[in-house]
Amino acid sequence: MSAPKRRVPAAQRGARLTRRTPEDGAAPAFPRRPSGKRGSAARHSAPPGPAGPHPVEIAGHLHELTVRLLAADSLNQALDRLAVATAALAGVVRCSVVLIGEGGPLTEASAGPAGETFDRLQYEGGAGPGLEAARTRTVVTATDLAGDERWPELRAAARTENLRAVVAIPLDVRRTAVGAVSVYPDRRGDVDPEVLVTAMALAGQAEVLLGELHRREALTEGAVVDRAVGVIIAQRGCGVQEAYAILQESAQRLGLDRGTVAARLVTAAARNAG
């Protein structure tokens, strides 16, 4: 036997109808989806975002930098090669690299047709975009160097040497030094995003490579210092601690680092022995 049909009062039927039907031009409860044609047109009309450097291109720059820096004979040569590689980027007229070691002098390198006076004034005065990036460990930019009020002593040099703008990217060589890679574009204004991304990638790779080079130099310097101490002991008949003290005093008196003095002493001893 079938169940009896339930009768719905007319008032309720009207209420249901009212909820489903929009009133006075209001939007329906479930708006229509746009047709495929209109949706396709909306998607293609959206402005494209910035393309940026191609990953393969960045990978090529990083590979070339790695090979060149690991083949360097010294830290200074590695900095020179880093500056040359960065200055070769499209739209870049100059690159300067500076490292500030603990208790040591500035180590600098550069590549580009002009800017020596600008860098010299920056390092002598202790103020400028590269040094600020190194000390604060943040990216420092200037869109108009000739008019930038942060470094008034550098404005004349910027005008004379046609340095228009700069972005300084910090370098942090672990347990060794801090520094910066300063990139000078060929026009005023913000640095091209593609150049900025590539330069930052090069700087990040350089941090790792420079740390490895410094580790190698430390090992080599340690071996040379040990040999120099042996020469001092043989010449003076003193103990090990006294020999180290003599070597350190000689370095301070000559204004040179201990590794350089040790290498000269070993070379002189070998020459006299021959």
Image (tube, rainbow, N blue to C red):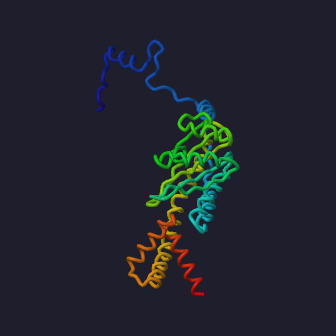
Residue 273's image quarter? bottom right
> Which of the two residues, 144 or 56, is positioned nearer the viewer here?
144
Residue at image position (59%, 64%) is 69
Image quadrant holding the C terminus, namely: bottom right
Return the residue found at the far top. 24
- Above or below, 26 against 146 in this view is above
Residue 52's image quarter? top right
Locate residue 14 relative to residue 167 in the image: left or right: left
Q: Position of residue 22 (x, y in %)?
A: 44, 17
Residue 175's image quarter? bottom left
> Which of the two residues, 135 or 45, is positioned nearer the viewer here?
135
Residue at image position (68%, 51%) is 112
- Above or below, 16 against 141 in this view is above
Q: Position of residue 90 (x, y in %)?
A: 68, 48
Q: Is residue 216 visible?
A: no
Residue at image position (55%, 34%) is 149
> Which of the two residues, 178 or 207, is positioned nearer the viewer here?
178
- Above or below, 6 against 155 in this view is above
